[in-house]
């Protein structure tokens, strides 16, 4: 499964499920948006298994994305969830910080965990490279690719002009001969980066998400996939401030994996009038959206706007248009504009366009300031 396929599905309501498996991580990267560390909490494994086992061939997400923390600290759970999802026809993608690859090898327990996985992505940036050398990550990624799994890289830098981004994306393209896609994002002042990352690291068009400035409302594709948080709560948004908030703002809460099944969560995601409005018209900045409960008039207006058959049709049509526009177009909005074409690497139809962008550095992650989508 190509990274571009996953990104194209991102605006489609309930086309994917993003599940955090743990906040634990043996690495201590200075920019970690989830503030993960050796003593973080684990998402309830039994409840996750039951929830994913509820997928059916007629009612399932297209993709299950497993992240953390470091999801491969729970290799048995990764294997179980990927196998359960595969029974229903859902494909699984895993995002890892590559803690296991210090010597360039991939332990057998990790390869066994990935046997039902369709896509594997490695996080790499100046912070990860202080923990796991680039050459070791490359060797391990070759091994994973040789096992038949499509691979990609999630890269983070400060700004589009960051020299590191040009260097690392160039190295990836050379090492993997343009057969590994790259998704580039910018470091945001959230999680461990909140204490040092300045607003200047955020592209101007994203500054409203940080409360730096106000911009007109715009449709939000990040309110399309349910996100399982570390305690099992299911949110409608991957913004880390939403994922970590307790209680989650009611209009962004879809349920809990110990109480609700996939069909219920999917229906709430697709049919919520407020979420339809967020996806098709927007309600201001991320801060405005999170704070709707404190603005009863705005919340009521969003509910009215998203009600009725016409609103449902507009939601479906908007998602279809964004999907048809392709992964690179979406990344120009949510990732690094300059490096967006690199998400097409490895795609026979998209390689030509990427070649035309020779000399632009890398591509980053889709998402705002939180859990990677």
Image: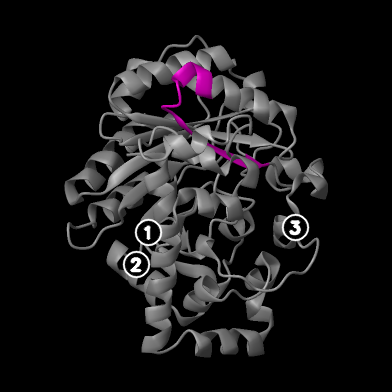
**Mark 2 surroundings within 10 Å by alpha-carbon count, few (fewer than 14), some (14 through 19), many (20 or more):** many
Mark closer to the observer (2, 1): 2
Tell me residue 363's x, y (percent).
Answer: 58, 38
- Left or right: where does residue 54 sit relative to residue 157? left
Q: Is residue 226 above or below residue 44?
A: below
| 3 or 1: tag closer to the N-terminus | 3
Mark closer to the observer (3, 1): 3
Asked which secondary structure carries label 3, the reply is helix
Asked which secondary structure carries label 2, the reply is helix
**Observer-nearest of 20 and 116:** 116
Q: Examine the rendering and report whether any part of residue 37 can be seen.
A: yes
Q: Which residue is mark 1?
A: 257
Q: Is residue 278 above or below residue 326?
A: below
Q: Could you tell me which residue is drawn at 81 percent across and 50 percent down?
A: 199
Q: Which residue is mark 2?
A: 266
Q: Could you tell me which residue is drawn at 29 percent across and 21 percent down?
A: 147
Find the magenta span and give its range: 173-186
């Amino acid at each position: 499964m190509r990274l571009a396929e996953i990104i194209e599905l991102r605006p489609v309501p309930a086309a994917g499920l993003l599940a955090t498996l743990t906040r634990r991580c043996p690495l201590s990267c200075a920019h970690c948006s989830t503030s993960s560390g050796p003593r973080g909490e684990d998402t309830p494994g039994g409840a996750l298994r039951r929830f994913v086992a509820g997928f059916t061939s007629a009612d399932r997400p297209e993709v299950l994305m497993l992240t953390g923390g470091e999801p491969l600290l729970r290799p048995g759970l990764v294997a179980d969830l990927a196998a359960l999802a595969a029974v229903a026809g859902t494909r699984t993608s895993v995002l890892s910080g590559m803690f296991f690859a210090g010597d360039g090898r991939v332990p057998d327990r990790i390869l066994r965990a990935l046997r039902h996985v369709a896509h594997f992505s490695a996080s790499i940036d100046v912070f990860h490279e202080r923990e796991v050398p680039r050459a070791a990550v490359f060797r391990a990624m070759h091994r994973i690719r040789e096992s038949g799994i499509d691979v990609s890289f999630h890269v983070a830098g400060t700004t589009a002009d960051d020299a590191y981004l040009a260097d690392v994306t160039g190295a990836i393209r050379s090492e993997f001969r343009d057969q590994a896609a790259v998704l580039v994002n910018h470091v945001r002042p959230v999680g461990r980066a909140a204490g040092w990352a300045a607003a200047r690291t955020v592209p101007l068009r994203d500054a409203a998400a940080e409360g730096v400035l106000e911009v007109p409302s715009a449709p939000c594709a990040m309110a399309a996939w349910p996100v399982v948080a570390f305690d099992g709560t299911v949110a409608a948004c991957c913004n880390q401030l939403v994922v970590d908030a307790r209680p989650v703002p009611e209009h962004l809460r879809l349920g809990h994996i110990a109480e609700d099944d996939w069909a219920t969560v999917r229906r709430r995601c697709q049919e919520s009038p407020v979420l339809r409005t967020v996806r098709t018209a927007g309600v201001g900045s991320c801060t405005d959206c999170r704070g709707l409960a404190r603005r009863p008039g705005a919340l009521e207006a969003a509910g009215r706007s998203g009600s009725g058959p016409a609103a449902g049709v507009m939601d479906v049509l908007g998602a279809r248009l964004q999907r048809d526009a392709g992964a690179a177009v979406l990344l120009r909005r949510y990732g690094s504009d300059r490096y967006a074409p690199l998400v097409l690497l490895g795609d026979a139809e998209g390689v030509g366009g990427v070649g035309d962008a020779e000399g632009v550095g890398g591509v980053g992650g889709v998402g705002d300031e939180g859990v990677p989508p």
